[in-house]
Image (tube, helix red, strand yellow):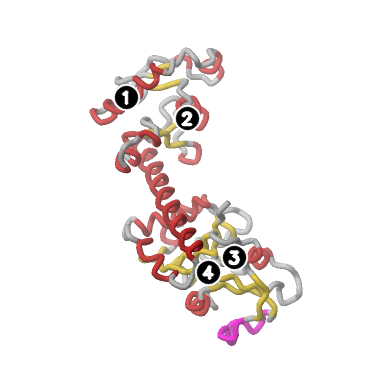
Amino acid sequence: MQRYWWVNHKQTFKHEIAGGFLWSPKFKSNGDRNYFYDTMADAEVGDIVLSYANGKVSYFGVVVEEASTAQKPSEFGAAGDVWDNDGWFLPISWQKISPSIQPKLIWDEIQHLFPQKYSPLNGQGGGNQGCYLAEISEQIFLTLMQYSLEKNPILFSTIQKNLATTSSALRRQITEVKRTVNQRIGQLQFRNEVIKLEGACPITGVASPAFLRASHIKPWRVCETAEERLDPYNGLALAPHIDQLFDQGYITFDTSGSLILSDECPPMIPIQWGFEEKISQSLIEVNSKRKSISTIIIAMFLNTK
């Protein structure tokens, strides 16, 4: 499974980007182990790394070989005087992010995504001193990349220019990374737009984005175009348990926005989950665009009964 990493490397940034690698000592200067050094050995081929230096995320890279033991690069000079010479060398294929991303400027929007423990950023959105390579969630990566992609939609178009010397298998892997990232960023954009449009789950009233899912009205698999897949009017913001009912065809909404319950839905579910009285009530706003989609879904829903 592909993993995501964040490296804080202000002192060695220029050398590591230019050289296509990351390097860290294996132990602290006192001989103790360091979680943020141990992670170097955990990174695998195809994993993605975000580069953070001088307050900015300016590069992302793909791991091209697993880490191996290597001496401290001589080009580090005085930057690594306090580090042990024995360390980890991790080859990376770097790609510039333009425009770069300054986490501090959007910290209020992204702070909740970062872990309490082993976070690469501190509570103010600056670099966490002592952190070198930290694992991050896919959502952190996609959210940050979305900010840059909104200003530069062709961000990934030049990624293979730097791969001329790599194997064909790796180039295929990088291409797959590009495809997956673009697709998931699209899904994240869809989620954000749906939640912005809807505001809350129409059945439970839950409004916190952390507890909402963006569910497609017309399923992703049967959408005919990318525009249709990403159209926020083809989506509903639903609480997770309600989303499960909707996704499995136990509930839907008619062309007036009223909630419909399938005959296949266990009768105790609406009672136990507290929405029995909302059946047949108009709960979602319907416009001409959503109505045409709803008509299709009603037909699909009735055909499954």
Q: Amino acid at mark 2?
A: Asp
Residue at 39% across, 54% down: 146
Q: Are marks 1 and 3 in contact (CB under 8 Å)?
A: no
Inspect the image, locate mark 1, and give the three-letter code of the amino acid beneath it.
Answer: Ile
- Mark 3 lies on residue: 133
Where's the C terminus, which quadrant?
top left
Amino acid type for the residue under numbered disc 4: Ile
Q: Position of residue 35 (x, y in %)?
A: 68, 63
Distance CA(mark 1)–CA(mark 4): 47 Å
Q: Nearer the viewer, mark 4 or mark 3?
A: 4
First in residue order: circle 2 vs circle 3: 3
| Mark 1 or 3, closer to the camera | 1
Q: Earlier in the sequence, mark 1 or mark 3?
A: 3
- Residue behind mark 2: 243
Image disc number at residue 92: 4
Q: Which range of residues does the magenta coloring cover?
A: 73-83
CA gap, disc 1 and disc 3: 48 Å
Characterize the local packing of mark 3: few (<14), some (14-19) or many (20 or more) Cα atoms within 10 angstroms. Answer: many
Residue closest to the eye, 228 or 107: 228
